[in-house]
Image: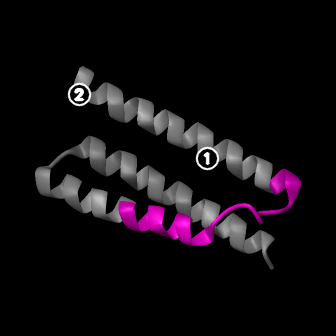
Amino acid sequence: MLAIAAPAISLVCLIFGTAHQIKLLLEQGTSKELSLPRIFLGIFAGIIWILYGRQINNICIIFTNSVGIVINVILALVIMHLRK
């Protein structure tokens, strides 16, 4: 039970924190304060973590980082849309 608590809490914080940030970006219509390279670095780090999770056969690591990658891709797309 405790082994799944940390990934579950991390996933909830990731989803709600980033979803709120995307909502604010869309409402304000600006993304000047966000770093697109940092978002891409987060995507890269997520891929590395997924590879590690596959290596040790840990579904929690794989699932949590898969969600993180999807959210970071959405965030990157929103930022690129706002910077046009």
Q: Residues within 10 Å of mark 1 (few under 14, many from 20)?
A: some
Q: Residue furthest top?
A: 1
Q: Secondary structure at mark 1?
A: helix
Q: Position of residue 25 (x, y in %)?
A: 78, 55
Q: Position of residue 8 (x, y in %)?
A: 39, 31
Q: Which residue was labeled with disc 1?
A: 18
**Residue ID at (33%, 25%):** 5
Q: Is 6 placed left or right of 38 in the picture?
A: left
Residue type marked 2? Ala
Q: Which residue was labeled with disc 2?
A: 3
Q: Is residue 73 above or below residue 3?
A: below
Quadrant containing the C terminus is bottom right
Q: Main secondary structure of the magenta part?
A: helix
The question of residue 31 being in magenta is answered with yes
Q: Position of residue 44 (x, y in %)?
A: 40, 68
Q: Secondary structure at mark 2?
A: helix
Residue type marked 1? Thr
Quadrant containing the N terminus is top left
Q: Residues within 10 Å of mark 2 (few under 14, many from 20)?
A: few
Q: Is residue 8 above or below residue 20?
A: above
Q: Quadrant of residue 6?
A: top left
Q: Is residue 72 above or below residue 14?
A: below
**Residue ID at (86%, 60%):** 29
Q: CB of mark 2 within 8 Å of CB of mark 1?
A: no
* Magenta-tinted stretch: 26-45
The question of residue 40 being in magenta is answered with yes
Q: Is 69 placed left or right of 4 in the picture?
A: right
